[in-house]
Image: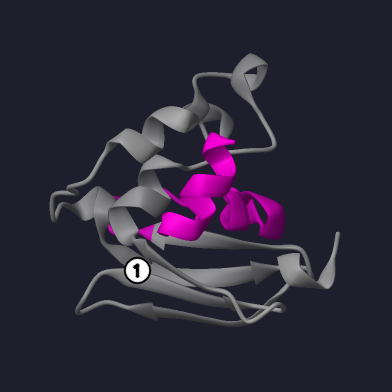
């Protein structure tokens, strides 16, 4: 993994419902909480182990609005070693392990969108 795929800061704003990650290459990713939850990489959310992938399901990028529901309200986050983070949601879900590569691939900004579409 390159240094650009390692975060140097992570913050979650519960008022604006936005997760912000600044990466080693100074790229700043801003994720609506709803996108983070929709992209959950756990086997249950992905529909079974046979659907597990290193990158987010492309369908998550077709959503532009995320309702304010218990499943999209982040209760907390916790580091997993030096490679990932887990989120706890108000509906009790907390099994998705989001590694740095996955989160960088989930970035919804225009620059990252253009890279995905190539």
**Residue 63: in magenta span:** no
Query: Can I make out residue 98 in this image?
Result: yes
Residue under the image location 42 percent in, 56 percent down: 110
Give the labeled residue for mark 1.
75
- Give x and y (percent) for residue 30: 40, 69
Q: Which residues are magenta?
A: 89-118
Q: Residue 24 is drawn in which quadrant?
A: bottom right
Q: How is the image coloured?
A: one colour
- Quadrant for the C terminus in the image: top right
- Quadrant for the N terminus in the image: bottom right
Q: SS at mark 1?
A: strand
The answer to whether residue 40 is left or right of residue 18 is: right
**Residue 34, above or below 80:** above
- Give x and y (percent) for residue 96: 55, 47
Residue under the image location 69 percent in, 37 percent down: 54
Q: Pointer 1: residues within 10 angstroms few (<14), some, or many (20+)? A: some
The answer to whether residue 75 is left or right of residue 104 is: left
Q: Residue 84 is drawn in which quadrant?
A: bottom right
Front-most of 12 and 57? Answer: 57
Residue under the image location 26 percent in, 61 percent down: 73
The answer to whether residue 10 is left or right of residue 2 is: left
């Amino acid at each position: 993994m390159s240094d650009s795929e390692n975060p140097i800061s992570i913050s979650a704003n519960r008022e604006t419902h936005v997760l912000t990650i600044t990466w080693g290459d100074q790229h700043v990713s801003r994720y609506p909480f709803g996108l983070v939850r929709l992209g959950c990489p756990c086997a249950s959310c992905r529909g079974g182990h046979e659907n597990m992938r290193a990158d987010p399901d492309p369908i998550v990028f077709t959503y532009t609005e995320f309702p304010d529901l218990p499943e999209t309200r982040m209760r907390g986050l916790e580091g997993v070693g030096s490679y990932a983070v887990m989120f706890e949601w108000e509906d009790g879900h907390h099994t998705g392990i989001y590694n740095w590569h996955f989160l960088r691939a989930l970035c919804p900004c225009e620059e990252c969108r253009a890279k995905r579409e190539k």
